[in-house]
Image (spheres, helix red, strand yellow):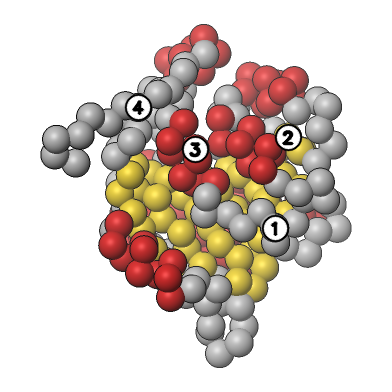
Amino acid sequence: MQGQRVTIRFSMSALFFKRFLKRPFQIASIVPSSRALVERVADKIDFDQARVIAEYGPGEGVHSREIARRMRPDCQLLLFELDAAFSRDLQRQFRGDPRVHVINDNAAHLPLELRRRAIDACDYIVSGIPFSILQIDKKRALLQQTHDALAAGGRFIIYQVTNELKQHAKIFDRAESEYFLQNIPPMFITVFEKSNGRNGASHLSLQESRASANNA
């Protein structure tokens, strides 16, 4: 905003930098999410209601730590991290938290993991993986699997440099975006919502819808 200074705080570990140099196209940004972005994404989750949350591509865990800090004692957090070094570090970070499960596997295997753990569905799925670099068939397949893995009224929350995924995610009943400047680079945060089954009704309140529209 004009006349205001925006301070963006972030920290980058040596591990994050090394993994970015090795796999620049698998990691969405050269720096981890800012504290402001982490808090904004977490604010999209109703932690009083959430029982199962999944995260695609948590990397060094900046979003994971905030989610785990806020979630209920009876909530489960499934972290899908394809990079083995990141996975080992996440295992170390969350070793003492039985609610958090680190899965060194492709996010596309979420439905299989839910069945393996006898979990019906996720209430929320959070993702920072760079969908824009995925081939169109893989992108749409992952979107379909994500939709299928969500409970009725569940939300898929993404933060991306571009907002191109919105045009491919027509299977979701609602999509609300905002452009968040307090990050390097700025990010689109989009919340896709699955119908709760009552005549396609959505859980997004009128107040939330207006707020999202004002920030879009």
Tell me which amino acid carries mark 4. Ile
Disc 1 crowd rating (10 Å Cα; few below 14, some 14-19, many 20+) is: few
Give the labeled residue for mark 2.
102
Label 3, secondary structure: give it: helix
Q: Residue at x 44, y 67 (%)?
A: 208
Instruction: Say if 112 sits above or below 130 in the image.
Output: below
Q: Which mark is residue 8?
A: 4
Tell me which amino acid carries mark 1. Asp
Q: Is residue 151 among the parts visible in the rendering? A: yes
Q: Residue at x 64, y 73 (%)?
A: 152
Instruction: Say if 139 sits above or below 121 in the image.
Output: above
Q: Quote the CA–CA distance across marks 2 and 3.
A: 19 Å
Disc 4 crowd rating (10 Å Cα; few below 14, some 14-19, many 20+) is: some
Determine the residue located farthest toward the top in the rendered image: 14
Eye-nearest disc, 2 or 4: 4
Q: Which mark is residue 48?
A: 1
Determine the residue located farthest toward the left in the rendered image: 2
Q: Position of residue 216 (x, y in %)?
A: 29, 58
Q: Which mark is residue 38?
A: 3
Q: Quote the CA–CA distance across marks 4 and 3.
A: 12 Å
In the picture provided, is 60 more to the left or to the right than 188?
right
Q: Residue at x 70, y 61 (%)?
A: 49
Sequence-wise, which precedes: disc 1 or disc 3?
Answer: 3
Tell me the quadrant of the picture where the N terminus can be found. Answer: top left
Label 1, secondary structure: give it: loop
Instruction: Say if 190 sits above or below 36 in the image.
Output: below
